[in-house]
Amino acid sequence: MATHPVETIPEMETGAAALRDNADSGGSPASSLLESLLEPVEQGVVILDHSRTPVFANRCARGMLSATTDGEIAGIIERSCPDGLFETCTSNGSAITYVDVTLPDQETRKLLGLEVRSIVIPGETAAFYVLIHDFSRWKKLDELRSRFATSLSHRMRTPLTAIRNAVKILSEQPLGGEEREKLLDIGWRNVEKLITNLDELQKIFMIESEEMKVCRTLTRVRHDLKPVFEKLQANSKLRGYKISMPETTVFTGRGNLMDFVVTAIEAYNTWLGEAPFIECSSSIREEICYHGGVERNLKIYLRPRTSGWLRSIREGLKDYLSFHEAHRGLVLSRLADALDAELDISSGNTISISLPLEPAFDREKDLVSPLHMMIERADLTGSEFCLIDMRVVGASDVVTRMVGILESVMCSVLADEHVVSKGEDGSSWVHFIVDKCPEDIEDIMRSVHEKFHEVCRRSGEQMIPSLRWETRYSRVAGECIPESKILDI
């Protein structure tokens, strides 16, 4: 039988500590503390004394076991948990068994997992607690997945049927200009709808198979978002747009961010029933971290320009994406997770995403994934590929402002097909450059260096750090790169 990951109860460790602290006080304070801690927990928990007699069972445990009294719970545990299970638990720390429970007044049964763990109290005989896992939850999840797939299949079958009928009529009957145009319009609109549904289905399967990988690169948000809005407007998915944000750079998955914006605008389309006018703005949020330091985030807002009357008569966007278009809400949420960002849909129907401005270095997102992507690009074009390390030297503490200046300069100097990722050091970067010889790369790096110094002088900086760069890896198209080499880079 396949098993599922076991849920843990952190409050149990607190309760065990309380038992140890109150061992000499008769146990009453510890029992009260355990009861208050475990009663609201959304998992079945049963406490057994050294003689395996139940002394406490929370509400969830009684519901799962379909038992109302301690005697019924004791009978189920006695029948299901043999002596050998408790001996294994005492020696190994935990042991698990399974039990079928008949629901009262029903013919159905449900499978439960009973995970027994021991509590060692100094000076006392070992006691036990039982975690109860309801495997029928996974069965319900499978049913929901089946219904979800059926819903998506229906979404694809409807436009396919419309296209088939339109083509059949056109092929069987000679029609005039107006009727012919009407059928062609029906076929075209349903082809667009089918393509949209297939895109959504692909995203859902990528989420399910955990294939939504992120290649995190330096992104100019306003510069990269503008073509997306222009394309959506050209395809009649936007009535218009206004981007009210300064040019800001951030390390994120550029493609995933564009997918997020497109998915959000498509959600507005279906919610409003028409192409919206979108206002896009941003703000910088700074929060003092609990462990010290400041966490800075770029928050991007997307909101439709609609009248208050329309918003008052229409169901809120958050509720709409939670029920009628739940798959779109799921895709938005998973895209935000892939970007290490926080998603928020406000009561005013604004979709916002909060991106970390200073994310920690992630080897897979910042080095390995961009490396694979750029090597594939070099192979397709038959070009040379170089990986360049760049770092700031000459300043012990490079302020955030100067790092921002340098990143803006790199974005303005480098071509769009070049990729810049975060380095392992806070003031270092990795450049992935295709189709440039070493001499050209040296000229590009010098241009970055000169423009950086020029911008710093114009801004009145008193101390301007220097830049150093070196070729970390180079490859001619067609050469094989072993996996071990990638791991060494």
Image (tube, grey):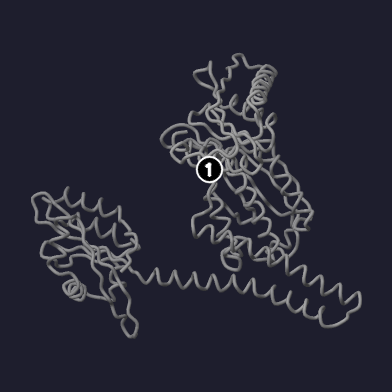
Instruction: Give left or right: position of 401 versus 106.
Output: right
> Residue at left 21%, top 49%?
17
Up the image or down, 370 lies above or below 190; here it is above
Quarter the N terminus occupies: bottom left
Q: Residue furthest top?
A: 462
Percent position (x, y) of residue 227? 74, 46
Up the image or down, 291 lies above or below 201; here it is above
Up the image or down, 370 lies above or below 348; here it is above
Query: Number of marks in the image?
Result: 1
Up the image or down, 345 lies above or below 459; here it is below
Instruction: Give left or right: position of 132 versus 466.
Output: left
Percent position (x, y) of residue 46? 23, 65
Q: Residue furthest right?
A: 177
* Element marked by disc 1: helix
Nearer to us in this view, 332 or 192:
192
Percent position (x, y) of residue 64? 31, 72
Nearer to us in this view, 277 or 376:
376
> Residue at left 70%, top 30%?
412
Q: Answer with the quarter of the image where residue 34 lies.
A: bottom left
Nearer to us in this view, 431 or 278:
431
Residue pointed to by mark 1: 369
Instruction: Give left or right: position of 281 versus 479.
Output: right
Q: Amino acid at mark 1?
A: Ser
> Residue at left 84%, top 74%?
182
> Residue at left 53%, top 43%?
369
Q: Answer with the quarter of the image where residue 200 lies.
A: bottom right
Percent position (x, y) of residue 429? 55, 30
The local crowd at label 1, few if under 14, some if 14 to 19, many if 20 or more residues have their Cα within 10 Å, is some
